[in-house]
């Protein structure tokens, strides 16, 4: 998927981003594209909205067309290139937000597994995304919250991430999905908006906009991050 008439640094980039974001917002739940509404909301002309969306979607007849989940995700990535990272993420559903976060991790070289569900003893756990790169394991909880990120709101999420990390390590080792020897594990909460605190009770909180830089520059030798070290060998539970 490529834009043939516009570039991220061009004079029309602001309107291209607007068109994509408004299209994403208006096509949730498989609603068809309404070109007139998209153009009006994006504050651009009908012709420009049609030109941009034809280039990006490949549709020849836009009114009435619906976007597949894959196409919605691709449009969001294009919006990121045009400077609308947070607005694009906000226009996605919470399920798409998780996938969006996973793709950021994969671009940084992590292997990801979404929707990890397992039992540890009598308790059932669920992790939105488990991500592994070399000997670094991330356990991510994705929060597609529309309201401000007050620290007090994260209480249960922080406790879940802390308490589930060791069981997750045991589960993955039992499944032979972790390398033998020491690994560094980190609990992370990914939010839609920039958090007011980047560290809550030994759990990292990062916005989806900050996520690419965070995971790209992540190192287990960073003493400011609350890594949990695990020295267990790979054993089947």
Image (cartoon, rainbow, N blue to C red):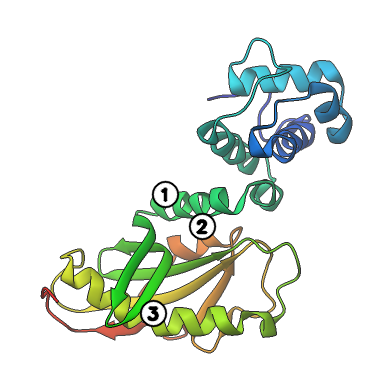
Pick whichever of labels 2 and 3 is earlier in the sequence: 3
Compute the Cα span from label 1 to label 3.
25 Å
The reply to whether discs 1 and 3 touch (Cβ–Cβ < 8 Å) is: no
- Residue 44 rendering spot, x and y as whole percentages: 87, 27
Q: Which residue is mark 2?
A: 212
Compute the Cα span from label 2 to label 1.
8 Å
Instruction: Tell me the quadrant of the picture where the C terminus can be found.
Output: bottom left
The crowding category of the residue bearing disc 1, from other C-alpha atoms within 10 Å (few below 14, some 14 to 19, many at least 20), is: few
Q: Quarter-wise, where is residue 115 in the image? A: bottom left
The reply to whether discs 2 and 3 touch (Cβ–Cβ < 8 Å) is: no
Query: Which residue is at the front of the view, 165 or 107?
Result: 165
Query: Which residue is at the front of the view, 221 or 171?
Result: 171
- Residue 126 rendering spot, x and y as whole percentages: 41, 68
Q: Residue at x 50, y 65 (%)?
A: 214
- Residue 23 rendering spot, x and y as whole percentages: 72, 33
Q: Residue at x 28, y 79 (%)?
A: 120
The reply to whether discs 2 and 1 touch (Cβ–Cβ < 8 Å) is: yes
In the displayed structure image, the side of residue 155 where residue 45 appears, left or right: right
Q: Which residue is mark 1?
A: 107
Q: Quarter-wise, where is residue 20 in the image? A: top right
- Residue 181 rendering spot, x and y as whole percentages: 15, 77
* Label number found at residue 164: 3
Compute the Cα span from label 2 to label 3.
24 Å
């Amino acid at each position: 998927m490529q834009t043939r008439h516009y570039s991220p640094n061009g004079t029309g980039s602001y309107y291209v981003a607007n068109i994509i974001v408004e299209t994403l917002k208006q096509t949730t739940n498989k609603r068809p594209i309404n070109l007139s509404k998209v153009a009006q909301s994006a504050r651009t002309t009908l012709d420009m909205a049609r030109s941009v969306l034809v280039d990006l979607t490949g549709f020849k007849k836009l009114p009435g067309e619906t976007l597949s989940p894959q196409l919605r995700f691709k449009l969001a990535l294009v919006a990121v290139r045009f400077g609308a990272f947070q607005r694009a993420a906000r226009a996605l559903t919470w399920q798409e937000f998780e996938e969006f976060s996973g793709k950021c991790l994969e671009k940084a070289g992590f292997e990801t597994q979404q929707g990890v569900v397992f039992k540890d003893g009598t308790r059932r756990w669920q992790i939105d995304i488990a991500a592994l790169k070399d000997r670094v394991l991330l356990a991510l909880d994705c929060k597609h919250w529309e309201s401000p990120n007050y620290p007090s709101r994260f209480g249960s999420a922080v406790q879940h991430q802390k308490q589930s990390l060791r069981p997750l390590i045991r589960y993955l080792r039992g499944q032979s999905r972790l390398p033998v020897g020491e690994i560094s594990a980190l609990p992370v909460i990914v939010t839609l908006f920039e958090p007011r605190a980047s560290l809550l009770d030994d759990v990292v909180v990062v916005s989806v906009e900050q996520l690419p830089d965070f995971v790209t520059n992540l190192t287990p030798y960073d003493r400011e991050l609350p890594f949990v070290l695990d020295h267990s060998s790979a054993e089947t539970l």
